[in-house]
Image: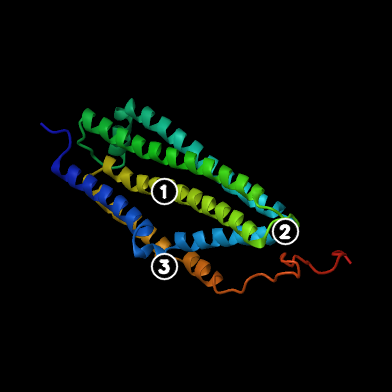
Amino acid sequence: MTILSTMDILALGWFLSAWIVFNIAVELTPLRNHTLSHLMERHRRGWMTSMSRRAVRIMDVGIAGGLQQGTAFFASTSLLAIGGCFALLTSREAVFNLLSDLGVNSADSPAAWELKVIGLALIYAYAFFKFGWAYRLFNYATILMGAVPDRGDEMSDEDIRTFAIEAGEMNVLAGRHFNRGQRAFFFSIGYLGWFADPRLFALTTLFVLFVLIRRQFVSKARSIAASAHQLPSPPIAAKGGVNTSAGSSKPLS
């Protein structure tokens, strides 16, 4: 006697295939050049290049700190979700009673229920590792940002640009790991359908996949990110710095 039915195995195979193929498509195939993530990676690199031209970089440090805080929030949420999964392992009867009250009857055996909960916990564990590593990479990116020399230092523009490129690449790498963690969160929503019925599991996986494809390729956010690349570069001052003039020196006058 097998723990999972044929429908369960097929639905699980569809779930894993959708997740893996989507990750490959948006990261390793030519399609990645048309994704929102790729456009934002270009903006991350452009941000570091623009930062290297600025004399005052307080704004850049604040943005980097915000990215770290957001990543830390998701990492903490992953740990809470893992704890919730362990709580579900001992709450099978209570959950089944709740599903029954909602008109959803599950024929899972105790072993099947535990297997599904462990699978959900593994998804959140994967997300935690991705968010934890992304947090560390954002920390490294902040250090590299601080290492970018000022224009007044005795370094050539090419050397300063090299530092900026390195900081940009570290920022891009951190963003990729963060995105992978978020995808795990999104697909975990589809995974929840398995607790009710494998057919619902297949449908919720399809729904999550549709949402992710739309956001990466045809969303309003992607259109904004793409159009921003058509804008001219910020004005450069005589000595190579960005013109940060805000108008009058007496803003209240």
Q: Position of residue 205 (x, y in %)?
A: 30, 51
Name the residue carrying label 3.
Answer: 218
Q: In front: 106, or 205?
A: 205
Secondary structure under tag 1 reads: helix
Secondary structure under tag 2 reads: loop
Q: Quadrant of residue 9?
A: top left
Q: Amino acid at mark 3?
A: Val
Does residue 17 lie above or below 239 as drawn?
A: above
* Residue under the image location 22 percent in, 33 percent down: 112
Q: Are marks 3 and 2 in contact (CB under 8 Å)?
A: no
The crowding category of the residue bearing disc 2, from other C-alpha atoms within 10 Å (few below 14, some 14 to 19, many at least 20), is some
* Residue under the image location 48 percent in, 64 percent down: 39
Tell me how far mark 3 sits from mark 2, CA to CA.
Answer: 40 Å
In which quadrant of the rendered image does the C terminus lie?
bottom right
* Residue under the image location 66 percent in, 58 percent down: 52
The crowding category of the residue bearing disc 1, from other C-alpha atoms within 10 Å (few below 14, some 14 to 19, many at least 20), is some
Q: In front: 77, or 90?
A: 77
Q: Are marks 3 and 1 in contact (CB under 8 Å)?
A: no
Q: Amino acid at mark 2?
A: Arg
Lower sequence index among marks 2 and 1: 2
Q: Amino acid at mark 1?
A: Arg
Name the residue carrying label 1.
Answer: 180
* Residue under the image location 55 percent in, 59 percent down: 45
The crowding category of the residue bearing disc 3, from other C-alpha atoms within 10 Å (few below 14, some 14 to 19, many at least 20), is some
Secondary structure under tag 3 reads: loop
Name the residue carrying label 2.
Answer: 151
